[in-house]
Image: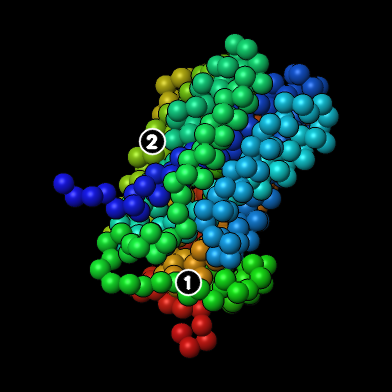
Amino acid sequence: MARIHYSWVILLIAFFSILVAGIVRSSSGVFIVPFETDFGWERSTISFAFALSLFLYGISGPFMAALVEVIGLKKMMGLAMATLLVGVSFTFWMTTSWQLILLWGVIISLGSSLFLTVLSSHVVNQWFGEKRGLALGILTASTATGQLVLLPVLAMLVETYSWKWAMGLIFLLAFLMLLVILLFMKNSPKEIGLLPYGLKEDWSVSETSEKKNPIAIAFQTLGEAVRVKEFWLLAGSFFICGLSSSGLIGTHFISYCMGFGFTAVTAASMLSLMGVFDLVGTTLSGWLSDRFDNRWLLFWYYGLRGLALLLLPFALSEGSVVLLVIFSIFYGLDWIATVPPTVNISRQVFGMEKSVVVYGWIFAAHQLGSAVAASGAGIIYQMFDSYSWAFTLAGLFCLFASLFVLVMKKQKREVSLSPSA
């Protein structure tokens, strides 16, 4: 019987780490109404805290990537999960809105940043020589898996008991994940005398970054990347990706559904259904990104997402569970499917060595879009007592993104950012 390569163990650890961080992030939609009810805070204030979280964990992504190169993957994962635990635990004792902003807007966002930004691409680059697209699709889908398994459970705990019971479950999962990281995580294949999965001869990414300041690494790479047209096109499309996904659906979907008479459990179940189909769609996207032009994959993903978002206000206004299920399936198939093609294009354009940090900056644009949607939708709700305009505008932006991703040149090989390239 063939021995399982340890790369797959690392993939499993990363998968569940991202799952836990993802459920913390996506649980914000479950907590908006309970926080509003229990503390008397305005929805725009709560939305601001979650928007700050989205922005801060996104903008810190390239620095997390650089820190991993300097202090190692295992230590960074341990520190990040411990930070996440601190933020979740202190949530039990918060009493004012500034504490929510500090805990969820700053501490929890920094704790989740590594897992939800660059961990997937770093693990794939370091541990896999083959099946990179598939591995990346699996890791990317883990965020949706958290929603698949836990969001209805969290919503049920909130409705049956209180939000503190749901927060307690999140704390327990994060604590268990920290133990797994400390016991089984490794920094690189070389540390345990292996080659990356599928490789027969040694290769390694340059280790010169270990002697540099992580802030210098992040900004130096950004300075080189901004000279390349594809960076702006990827960052711009990913801004719209964030605007139309985690910032909007992840933060406001449950509240939007509740405004039309659906229960929190029903709305959370729809998010779980999205998670089921996103798990399939994103894994398939990783497989497709190894075989087809990634620009055209992005074209179809953004176009279909835009149409789905335009359907949602109609489905809710009709009070139709059937249409809501159709939306959840349609939207779920490409919720995070944009990530594998975006990472692949980034690696092809900017080279293996710098692509993780570059992707960190591209993901920062994603989270800027998420923050705009999370905060902006809260403001739109405050003004119109409805989220419909927010979801309609997001759908139109997706249709726009589906067109300008085609402006990128087709990439046939990986190139370097060095002057000699």
Ranked by sequence position, the earlier of labels 1 and 2 is 2
How many neighbours does mark 1 have within 10 angstroms: few (below 14), some (14-19), or many (20 or more)?
some
Label 1 secondary element: helix
Q: What residue is pinned by disc 2? A: 277
Q: Is residue 300 above or below residue 197?
A: above
Say whether residue 219 is visible. Answer: no
Label drawn at residue 110 = none
Q: Position of residue 202 (x, y in %)?
A: 33, 72
Q: What residue is pinned by disc 1? A: 353
Query: Could you tell me which residue is drawn at 48 percent across and 40 percent down?
Result: 180
Query: Could you tell me which residue is drawn at 54 percent across and 60 percent down?
Result: 72
- In depth, the one of 285 and 23 nearer the eye is 23
Left/right placement of residue 41 relative to residue 138 reads right
- In depth, the one of 182 and 109 nearer the eye is 182
Q: Position of residue 104 (x, y in %)?
A: 70, 38
Query: Could you tell me which residue is drawn at 27 percent across and 61 percent down?
Result: 198
Q: Which amino acid, mark 1?
A: Glu
Label 2 secondary element: helix
Q: Is residue 403 above or below residue 311?
A: below
Query: Could you tell me which residue is drawn at 63 percent across and 73 percent down?
Result: 212
Q: Which amino acid, mark 2?
A: Phe
In which quarter of the view is residue 201 placed? bottom left
In which quarter of the view is residue 351 placed? bottom left
